[in-house]
Amino acid sequence: MSLTDPLTVGVGGTTRLYGIMGYPIAHSLSPLMQTFAFRAQHLDSIYVPFLVEPTQLASAVAGALALGVCGFNVTIPHKETIMAHLDEVSAAARTIGAVNTVQVRDGKTIGYNTDGEGFLQPLRTRQWPCSTAITCILGAGGAARAVAMALLEAGCPVLHLANRTLTRAERLAAALQHAFPQAQIAVVPWADVAPRARQSDLIVNATSVGLHDPSGALLPATCFRPGQIVYDLVYRPLYTPLLQAARQAGAIVIPGLDMLIGQGAAAFQIWTGRSFPIEAVRHLLQPFFTEAS
């Protein structure tokens, strides 16, 4: 069966069924984004939200298989716990410790993590020279791990990790250094992050600072300069205080919406093998985000 052939879903159905599992889930824009992409590619597929309580996750995965679901995304709070309920998990997802995309193939569930690919997508569009750049990542949680791995796999030679809890950054740095011995990975105390950020070609905010907070200031304005890229994984508001300050200093800014779309594009590619209408989806989603002035 090819990817364009209809798949029987339920009794007598021909539409391919996809979705997203989370708790809560009503806020998710993935159904809008993925359904638009299916229509753009003329695929007989739908994508729906699945509200799954944490205690029902195993049953939900089994139910998805029984219903003929072809694939689904996974969001909070299931991204880590779902790994125990899948038949296979990709090496990258295993290393990151989280799955956000599941493909159903030949009756088996295969877990992936598209955070890294989603993060890199807007950098590749800008033809950013990863292999010669110095990067500073703020944060040391799951998002920071996924971003750091993607950058190092793409050839980033120098990586600075800064986190308010130094020991957490040290643990992440040790794991990354073991996996990428050729890279220069340094842990930076939060008090010393400003000069490291200033000299970096790319600054990435992988913390939650700035989320729904118009007054949140993560770095002083002196950290930013023209030609630098400042990338905030937070996507509400569309332009966080960090990005506003960086833009005023002449830096190139990338909002978290770009990574959100990139993640969706990578999942769509896994499921269908088709290209994702990135610019059309960005235009579709922008009205849902506030742009702080």
Image (cartoon, grey):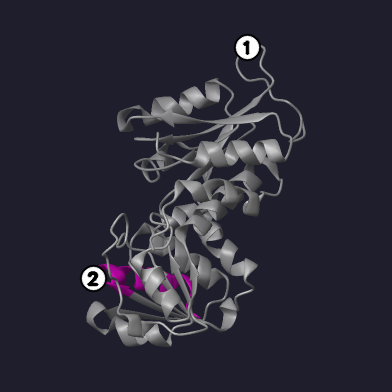
Q: Is residue 163 magenta?
A: yes
| Quadrant of image for the C terminus | bottom left
Is 121 situated above or below 47? below
Left or right? Give the position of 106 relative to 287: right
For the point 41% across and 69% down, the residue is 243
Task: Compare residues 175 and 250 and report the one nearer the observer.
Answer: 250
For the point 47% across and 25% down, the residue is 62
On the image, the x and y values in percent for residue 47 come to 56, 32
Instruction: Name the quadrant containing residue 36.
Output: top right
Amino acid, disc 2:
Arg
| Quadrant of image for the N terminus | top right
Q: Residue furthest front?
A: 293
Could one spot residue 143 in this view of the protein?
Answer: yes
Q: Is residue 289 magenta?
A: no
From the image, tell me which residue sits under label 1.
11
Amino acid, disc 1:
Val
On the image, the x and y values in percent for residue 82 come to 41, 39
Local crowd size for mark 1, using a 10 Å CA cut-off: few (<14), some (14–19), many (≥20): few
Left or right? Give the position of 211 relative to 85: left
Task: Compare residues 83 and 229 and report the one nearer the observer.
Answer: 229
From the image, tell me which residue sits under label 2.
164
The residue segment tinted magenta is 162-182
Instruction: Name the quadrant containing residue 77.
Output: top left
Is 114 situated above or below 215? above
Q: For mark 2, give the secondary structure.
A: loop
Q: For mark 1, give the secondary structure.
A: loop
